Amino acid sequence: MSDFEDRYWSSRDGLTLHYRYYAGREDRPPLLCLPGLTRNARDFENLAERYCGEWRVLCPEMRGRGDSDYAKDSTTYNPLQYVDDITALLEQAGIERFVAIGTSLGGLMTMVMAMTMQERIAAAVLNDIGPVIEPAGLERIQGYVGQGRNFPTWMHAARAIEEGQSVAYPDYEIADWLAMAKRLMTLSSNGRIVFDYDMKIAEPFAANDASGDVDLWPGIAGLRGRPVLLVRGELSDILGEKTLATMTERLPEAEAVTVPRVGHAPTLDEPESVAAIGRLLARVS
């Protein structure tokens, strides 16, 4: 397993936030890996190990996730605040340009950044997300976020995740569910296995849709003229085929890849994803 450093940065409202830093070539823009709603830096372990050395890889944990501070005010759990936090990270780490790799919520953040700092994005991967979120998928996520369940063993945790997610990963074996449990969860101080995020992230999410009232199509327009990869899980209930088709019309130079027999969201470790990310990075100057 590759070595990474645990590093920290400060949000403008005084939180200490955590990211994993994997060393790599300084003459290339780093890969900035932005995770989904309930996820953390561990989601990108395999990707980081594939590319570190050749590329620097930063895997930040948004406020309320992993080893980042939990917010005192739950209304700050929203995409615009997360982008502000990432802007502070870029400033404090001295990063001018970067390759954004955004899964789900991380992709929403990437679209917002393409509206606010488009010149800093060297290339982008939008993983199973677009400017339009399918209502069925949104409803499904609202059904499980913030429930605060806990489990006595990793096997119990893995079985619970399988129960909720098997529709998205029909080919997973128990080893895959165990690996997912260890990415999503952590051992609490009382010895129970719990989800590794602040349950209060569900509050603003439940009160609104995932992207708020922001029209994200200008974020797609903001990605023109640079390498872009659009990844969709074939079974996705978040990114519809019609939305993906419109995205590719508006970004004719982007590559669109559909990962077979996977729902929301591809892990980016599938052979199709790995090959496509390789092609994208070969185009980054």
Image (cartoon, rainbow, N blue to C red):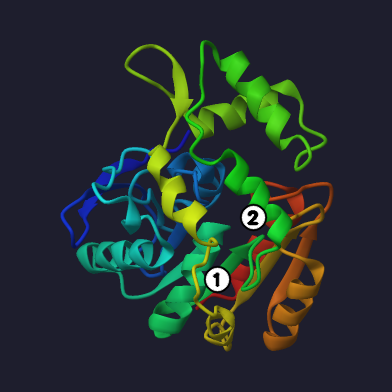
**Residue visible at 78% across and 47% down in the picture:** 262
Q: Is residue 186 above or below residue 260?
A: above
Q: Is residue 167 above or below residue 277?
A: above
Rendering coords of residue 16 (x, y %): 21, 48
The kind of residue on which mark 1 rests is Ala
Rendering coords of residue 75 (x, y %): 33, 56
The residue to which callout 2 is attached is 138
The kind of residue on which mark 2 rests is Leu
Q: Is residue 81 above or below residue 71?
A: below
Helix, strand or loop at label 2? It is helix
Measure the C-alpha gap from mark 2 to mark 1: 23 Å
Residue found at the far left of this picture: 14
Q: Is residue 276 above or below residue 172?
A: below
The circle drawn on residue 112 is none
Rendering coords of residue 176 (x, y %): 68, 29
The residue to which callout 1 is attached is 124
**Residue visible at 46% across and 25% down in the picture:** 194
Q: Is residue 180 left or right of residue 171?
A: left
**Residue visible at 45% across and 83% down in the picture:** 115
Q: Quadrant of residue 283?
A: bottom right
Q: Residues within 10 Å of mark 2 (few under 14, many from 20)?
A: some
Rendering coords of residue 58 (x, y %): 39, 54
Residue 54 seen by the camera: no
Label 2 or label 1, whichever comes before in sequence order: 1
Helix, strand or loop at label 1? It is strand
Residue 102 seen by the camera: yes
Q: Nearer the viewer, mark 2 or mark 1?
A: 2
Q: Choose between 144 and 69: the one closer to the eye.
A: 144
**Residue visible at 32% across and 16% down in the picture:** 189
Tally the numbered discs: 2
